[in-house]
Amino acid sequence: MAKKREQWGSRIGFIVAAAGSAIGLGNIWRFPTVTGQNGGGAFVLLYLVLVFLVGIPVLMVELSLGRKAQRNPVGAFKTLAPGTLWKWVGAMGVAAGFIILSFYSVIAGWSVAYIFKFLLGAFTGLSPAGIAQEFNALVTHPVIPLLWHGLFMLLTAGIVVLGVAWGIERWNKILMPMLLVLLIVLVVRSVTLDGAREGVYWLLRPDFSQLSFASVLTALGQVFFSLSLGMGAMITYGSYLGARENIPGSAVYIALADLAVALLAGLVIIPAVFAFGLNPETGPPLIFLTLPAVFQRMPLGGLFGAMFFFLLSIAALTSAISLLEVVVAYFVDELNWSRAVAAPVLGFAIFLLGIPSSLSVGPLAGFKLWGMPILDFKDWFTAVIMLPLGALLTVIFAGWVWGRRRALEAAGGGRPFVLADFWYFLVRWLLPVALAGILFSGLSR
Ligand code: TRP
């Protein structure tokens, strides 16, 4: 007899866990960065529209596929389309989870290291150049970043091994409220700084002359990354849902929580950067270089800095949990491993795969794949190729293979829901075109 499949303990527990997956480095690091590079307010508005038009519909597709099949991504496609090649879409998702987590954890490790740096006053009195030196000393060291990366993977596997309700759900319910409190404290600190107002305006006042076609594709990519779409993370989380769960309603809550945290993170970072006369358009170094320069100049900056990187680490941890769970669910469902073996063994394998990513910032910097250091290559290959391709094939499956009746049945759990026909229209027509667009533009860059 088959073992009974694990399930979420409650609806709210599921929503918090899925929001925990969505809310991560993508919201707190990537969103303010791409907003900074795309001119502020107009990009925020564009992002908002795309969350509703693209993000929520695809999130509903993934959750529905998972709930219907009650399986990991590979098993889900095998169950829904037996004997076809569709299972390889799931396999690509599992592989993407493996690869993404191997570098996500390296960056998360830097964030954990920064908590201690701030607490110990490592940045006190440093100029921006001094801060850059401190950052470089950390990330180029051959051993120390590996210890932080290892610690982070240990925490991730330690929670996943406890199971869906007792591990993932319970820890998300502890960590996510902490994240929210820290975020609100930091928003208040940031917007009350002298000179912060300019930053708030910059974030909220749309200037459409700054938007290009490339901004639309950047915003779409950000929607996918931020909502954990395109690799079956939400298929896996959906597979622990019972038949009566309201998927459209939950998808809206998850997306709104993700959006709110991205906007609040923008309100922490951008006004503070303006208040100290720094540039919000600096790109990826914004978090690890510009922000310490900001904290270092405010009263109690060490404390606020430590709080910020604690928040960033929590956000990364709850996302890393979902990435590992995709891989673990595959080994548990398809290869009959026990969770107690799968979580530590796969967590360790991902740790090993992350070592070259970490070293690629330091000793292995000269080694290039397609002209990029290993970490950048993995980021590009997953975010630009694997995720859009996975999402494209997933919506094609729902819109063209599954068909209208089964898709609506699965999303609504047999009951009608608001805008159901509009949702199915998006899934069948608009989303495949939009996703093919992201994929081709990514490939042709
Ligand atoms: N959504 C997370 C973030 O914003 C990252 C993440 C977790 C993710 N699981 C994913 C991204 C699956 C893509 C696919 O940081």
Image (tube, rainbow, N blue to C red):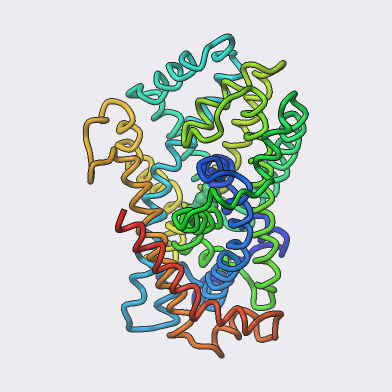
Which is more toward the observer, 158 or 73? 73
Q: In x, y percent, where is residue 181? A: 75, 38
In the image as oriented, which residue stretches furthest toward the front?
Answer: 209
Q: Where is residue 299? Give x, y as percent.
A: 72, 16
Relative to residue 90, is residue 120 drawn left or right? right
Is residue 311 something one can see in this rendering? yes
Q: Of 190 and 214, which appears nearest the observer?
A: 214
Question: In which image quadrant can residue 387 be found?
Answer: bottom left
From the top left corner, tell me how far across and down residue 428 is, in percent.
Answer: 49, 81
Residue at 62% across / 70% down in the picture? 241
**Residue 5 is at least partly visible in this image:** no
Number of labelled discs? 0
Instruction: In the displayed orientation, state which residue is furthest to the bottom.
Output: 405
Above or below for 87 versus 135: below
Q: Tell me: residue 333, above or below residue 341.
A: below
Q: Is residue 334 left or right of residue 301?
A: left
**Image location (x, y in percent) of residue 62:** 53, 70
Residue at (49% x, 45% y) in the render? 157
**x 60%, y 39%: residue:** 314
